[in-house]
Image: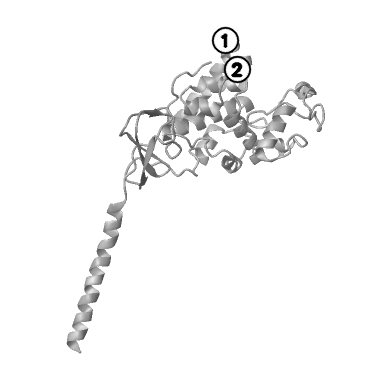
């Protein structure tokens, strides 16, 4: 009996020793993440990059081909916190404290929670490329937003005399909310009946018949701003999102938002105002402006 008991105790001791070793082994098994993938970087065969918590190796020369979405990349598996891991793709690169620092006099309508809720509509926004590029895009968007709204003070266009001008009756859907219902609203100052129609269709909201939602619901307002930023080129040749993540520069975001009125020397003071705000916001977020600031 004593011999059997001793044998059982010895077995338990051996098992405990194995279990004690297992956590250390698991911790060592985590693979460090390579440097985060950047859409503007050039990769050659054998180059490594991480994207959304996984490591990838390039098979040949590539640029702006996202890991996981192109055959040029070989998936090397999940990676842990040991290297320059991609940040949580759900987390916004701008904290609430930074947001408040950027907009100290903002209208209470423009809530941080409204912005972060709206992000799910366009998950690539401020979530593409390296941390530097992600923060740069957030700074670029918010700088243009600041310019359009006087520092997130104005919810709707201040010049009411312009209100009736934003109804294009040549559109087959007309202006069901009224001739003067499609004035500028929200962070990008969405205007014109056809833009309300297009934004509403994209977001699943009937903004053509009820454009007032943009000045009544903070999340809807932010979503319209993100819709324009991520999908519209306006008078430019690319979306503002692509202008930043593909390295074309902040100047091209200005061109896409109000290039006809400001670019090519038309209004250098307004352009410089946007650039100044962009520079300020990149410093708050701890990133760089990149080149091609003006249009």
Q: Is residue 81 left or right of residue 141?
A: left
10 Å crowding of disc 2: few (<14), some (14-19), many (20+): many
Instruction: Give the Cα distance between marks 2 and 1.
Output: 10 Å
Q: Position of residue 291 (x, y in %)?
A: 44, 20
Q: Position of residue 134 (x, y in %)?
A: 46, 34
10 Å crowding of disc 1: few (<14), some (14-19), many (20+): few
Residue at 34 percent of width and 34 percent of height? 59
Q: Quadrant of residue 283?
A: top left
Residue at 60 percent of width and 23 percent of height? 257
Q: Nearer the viewer, residue 104 or 68?
A: 68
Q: Which residue is mark 1?
A: 265
Q: Closer to the observer: label 2 or label 1?
A: 2
Which residue appears farthest toward the bottom when viewing the image?
1
Q: Nearer the viewer, residue 72 or 237?
A: 72
Residue 183 visible in the current orientation: no
Q: Is residue 170 above or below residue 108?
A: above
SS of the residue under disc 2 = helix
Q: Nearer the viewer, residue 16 or 63?
A: 63
Q: Is residue 212 above or below residue 277?
A: below
Residue at 54 percent of width and 17 percent of height? 272
Q: Position of residue 73 (x, y in %)?
A: 38, 37
SS of the residue under disc 1 = loop
Q: Which residue is mark 2?
A: 259
Checking the image for residue 67, the label placed there is none
| Tag 2 near tag 1, CB within 8 Å | no
Q: Quadrant of residue 219?
A: top right
Residue 165 visible in the current orientation: yes
Q: Is residue 202 left or right of residue 101?
A: right
């Amino acid at each position: 009996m004593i011999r059997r008991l001793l044998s059982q105790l010895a077995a338990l001791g051996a098992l405990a020793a194995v279990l004690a070793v297992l956590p250390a082994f698991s911790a060592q098994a985590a693979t460090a993440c390579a440097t985060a993938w950047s859409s503007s970087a050039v990769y050659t065969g054998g180059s490594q990059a991480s994207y959304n918590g996984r490591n990838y190796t390039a098979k040949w020369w590539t640029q702006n081909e996202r890991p996981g979405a192109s055959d040029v990349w070989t998936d090397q598996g999940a990676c842990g916190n040991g290297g320059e891991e991609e940040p949580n793709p759900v987390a916004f690169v701008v904290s609430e404290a930074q947001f408040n620092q950027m907009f100290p006099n903002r209208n209470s309508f423009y809530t941080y929670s409204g912005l972060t809720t709206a992000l799910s509509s366009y998950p690539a926004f401020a979530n593409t490329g390296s941390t530097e590029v992600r923060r740069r895009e957030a700074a670029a968007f918010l700088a243009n937003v600041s310019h359009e709204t006087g520092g997130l003070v104005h919810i709707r266009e201040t010049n009411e005399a312009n209100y009736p001008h934003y109804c294009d009756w040549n559109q087959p859907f007309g202006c069901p909310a009224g001739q003067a219902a499609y004035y500028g609203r929200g962070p990008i100052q969405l205007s014109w009946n056809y833009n309300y129609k297009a934004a509403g269709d994209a977001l699943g909201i009937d903004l053509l018949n009820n454009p007032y939602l943009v000045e009544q619901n903070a999340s809807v307002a932010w979503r319209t701003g993100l819709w324009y930023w991520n999908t519209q080129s306006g008078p430019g040749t690319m979306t503002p999102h692509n202008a930043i993540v593909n390295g074309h520069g902040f100047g091209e975001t200005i061109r896409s938002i109000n290039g006809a009125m400001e670019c090519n020397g038309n209004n250098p003071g307004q352009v410089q105002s946007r650039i100044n705000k962009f520079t300020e916001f990149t410093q708050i977020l701890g990133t760089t402006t990149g080149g091609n600031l003006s249009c």
